[in-house]
Image (cartoon, rainbow, N blue to C red):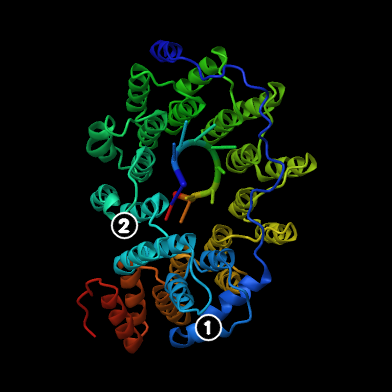
Amino acid sequence: MLILANRLSSLRPTEPLLKPISYNYNLTTTTSPPSPPQDATIVNLVLKTDSQTLTRTLEKYPVEWTPNLVDRVLKLLWNHGPKALQFFKSLDYHPTYAHVSSSFDHAIDIAGRLRDYKTLWTLVDRMRTRRLGPNPKTFAIITERYVSAGKPDRAIKIFFSMHEHGCVQDLNSFNTILDVLCKSKRVEMADNKLFKVFRGRFRADTVSYNIMANGWCLIKRTPKALEVLKEMVKRGLNPTMTTYNILLKGFFRAGQLKEAWEFFLQMKKRKCEIDVVTYTTVVHGFGVAGEVRKAQRVFNEMIGEGVLPSVATYNAFIQVLCKKDNVENAISVFEEMLRKGYMPNSTTYNVVIRGLCHVGRMEKAMEFMARMKDDECEPNVQIYNVVIRYFCDAEEIEKGLNVFEKMGDADCLPNLDTYNILISAMFVRKKSDYLLTAGKLLIEMVERGFLPRKFTFNRVLDGLLLTGNQDFAKEILRLQSRCGRLPRRLKL
DNA sequence: GTAGGGTTAG
């Protein structure tokens, strides 16, 4: 503890020492506004039109295509990658509309998620031919996609080849690749292959060091994070509030509650301008560790200190009450936040709805779903997934399927989790109808660009064979080999 | 889209 305190006091405080009271509390919603009905109409049109006729359909469609509209449609089609790319490609033939770079970035992101690297690089080349890029953001997207596909070495190579694609390689892009690796927990790799070797060449700055410290914290190695801190000070770089908040969160994540508390006290003692992020971290940290009273006290204390809670602070506190206290109290805080003029966002609704589902109060949860829509905040796919999951867990499979079907009407497409949740639910009771549904869901998810796990394929296959649906099983088996998975040896 | 706080089950 002493060592920690000494280390902290040896660091210079953030400058400026005293900022005016932070007014960064957020009274307005941070949720994106609901998309115009026209967007949903276009999305549905794209979904039901086959690829051959899409170009002509879009050409005739009575709307003025703008970059904004195109980006919104791509975003809505996020969970139907193949259709999203068809839309992008078809519109590329439009006689008067030309894609801008942000739409290219979206399309590249989608191709990367589908692991369709051929399309990805074709798009990059086309972008270059049209002098629209690729830009550093494009490379942030590409490297992130390679890393999340389990190809971090490839991502590093791509980073070093940026200049060959006509894109500058600077400190910012260096920091980006570090961050991409760290966020995927490949901190050792980021450290050994990039940071240690090239920090001199790129003139690593506070941001670079913060990224590395955060990386170590993410894998719960706080001593390494403290080393980074020491190192940056040695190099004459001043830690910032961000640095301290990273460490603080790191202690909580690593379960070092005493260290976290000491660190927080030191921050206060050294008159760092404790900000709303610090308080949110502490409220959440103590709360999830089960120390609800302490979380409560800190939450009350911050206002006295002149730091107003943000929507995120409320979300943290509400989540803590749901998990470690009770939902009623959580709902009181939710109502209190409304009274004070805060606008709940989708995370707020998510934690409350989750809390209600968890104690089996499904009707009340559905009430909140409706309330959300009244607040012009469309439930997102995560919220749908929570509700579907809990209906299925309660063996109310039909209700779960109803909610799933409703998603299609709203502008929210199911994602990989949705399919996994539903498919597993079909196996709770080995009813033949449900096993067929599982098969159909599996086919649909592949069509939409999601790659089911081997386990999922096998489970569905077993189910179909067990209920005598040999032909359907064969179809699934063909699907599996098309997905590039080795088909299991089966007696059909 | 160069860094820190709220959603993610067991």
Instruction: Identify which amino acid the numbered label 1 is placed on.
Output: Lys
Callout 1–callout 2 Cβ contact below 8 Å:
no
Measured as percent of width and height from the top left, residue A349 is found at 65, 52
The part of the image, by quadrant, that contains residue A479 is bottom left
Q: Is residue A12 left or right of residue A489?
A: right
Q: Residue at x 23, y 39 (%)?
A: A193
- Chain of the residue under label 1: A
- Decide which of A462, A230 is in the foreground and name it: A230
Measured as percent of width and height from the top left, residue A481 is found at 26, 77
Separation (CA) of disc 1 from disc 2? 30 Å
Instruction: Identify which amino acid the numbered label 2 is placed on.
Output: Ala
Q: How many marks?
A: 2
Q: Is residue A263 visible?
A: yes
Q: Is residue A291 visible?
A: no
- Decide which of A35, A62 is in the foreground and name it: A62
The residue identified by callout 1 is A48
Image position of A191 with respect to A32: above or below: above
The residue identified by callout 2 is A149
- In the structure shown, which secondary structural element does the residue marked by tag 2 occupy? loop
Q: Residue at x 62, y 42 (%)?
A: A315
Task: Sort mark 1 into few (<14), some (14-19) or many (20+) by Cα contacts within 10 Å.
Answer: few
- In the structure shown, which secondary structural element does the residue marked by tag 1 occupy? helix
- Decide which of A67, B1 is in the foreground and name it: A67
